[in-house]
Amino acid sequence: MFNITNKIRINVSVTDSISVSKVFANITRPGGGFISIQLKPSSGNQYNNSFTIPNVTGRYNVTFLANDTSNNKNFTVKTTFRANDSFKPRTYNVSVVTSIGYQTAVIKWFTDESANSSVKYGVSVSLGSLFGSNTTNVTFHSLTFGSLVASTFYYFNITSCDQSGNCLINGTFNFTTIPNPATGASGVGGGSVSVNDAQNVTKQPELLEKLPIQSLYERALSSFGVSRLAFAVAIILIFVAVTRDTERKNPKKRGKTKPYLTGD
């Protein structure tokens, strides 16, 4: 029994009454297709060569073919070996995408072989029951999570299992959702996040950097519960009151202007 991607040595003993010319090993892969390698003479009647098992599990059939110098052939000797996959997929470049939208985070990572994807997350190290997964075997993994809570610290780990059932759990990582720009406080509606791990640290965006001036004006009117007309009248009254107060405190300045001079 061997493991996929292992380098093994294929060996056969060949004798001939004249002289051996060439020896080959024809290796049929699981599911079809074959690879032919030439075996080299070593000591005595032994011929061998190394062979790296492809990333395919199952039974490999080997047929040996020997030619002598008179072109007589023998291909009656056969053998088999099996290859298993006992390696867990390795993960790297774990990251959390920011600025996707409020209540949303996208967790991404890579694996060195095709594997499925799952993420377990929660607001404590024990993670709880929040879970997301994708059964498709890929090397680039991306899972999107919604309904997050603003200004909240989340923990998560990632799991990838290859087609042979070898699974690797990686974590625990964490990220914090930003405050809800509409309220400036926690509550459902947060979403942009930054990952906090040794590999990726993503800068949080400024909360109001993308809000236009008109939007801020509308938010102010909405917060005070007044119409645009009432808001404008209030501004005019405040301006008149301030002007009168200034004149009352500085009566000498009323009616005074600088002289205007003209010449011939």
Image (cartoon, rainbow, N blue to C red):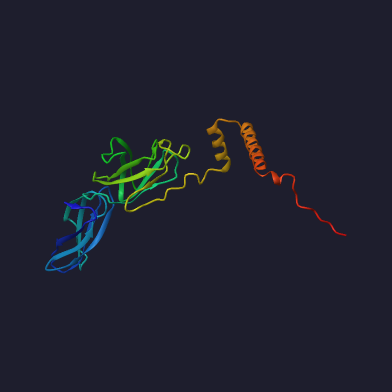
Instruction: Please name whichever residue, 191 or 73, is drawn nearer the observer in this view of the structure.
Output: 191
Above or below for 135 versus 35: above
Residue 9 location (% of width, % of height): 18, 60
Q: Give above or below for 29 relative to 40.
A: above
Q: Do we see residue 128 in this rendering?
A: yes
Residue 148 position in % (x across, y down) = 38, 37
- Residue 159 rendering spot, x and y as whole percentages: 28, 44
Residue 259 vertical position relative to residue 246 in the rendered view, above or below: below
Count of marks overlaid on the render: 0
Q: Is residue 140 visible?
A: no
Relative to 125, 152 lies left or right: right
Q: Residue farthest to the front?
A: 252
Give the percent coordinates (x, y) of residue 101: 45, 41
Q: Quadrant of the C terminus?
A: bottom right
Q: Quadrant of residue 165?
A: top left
Residue at image location 57% in from the left, 43% down from the top = 213
In the figure, is residue 16 to the left or right of 177?
A: left
Left or right placement of residue 190 versus residue 10 in this view = right
Residue farthest right in this picture: 264
Q: Nearer the viewer, residue 247 or 101?
A: 247
- Residue at horizontal 17%, vertical 68%? 41
Depth check, front residue: 5 or 77: 5
Question: In screen coordinates, is 75 left or right of 105?
Answer: left
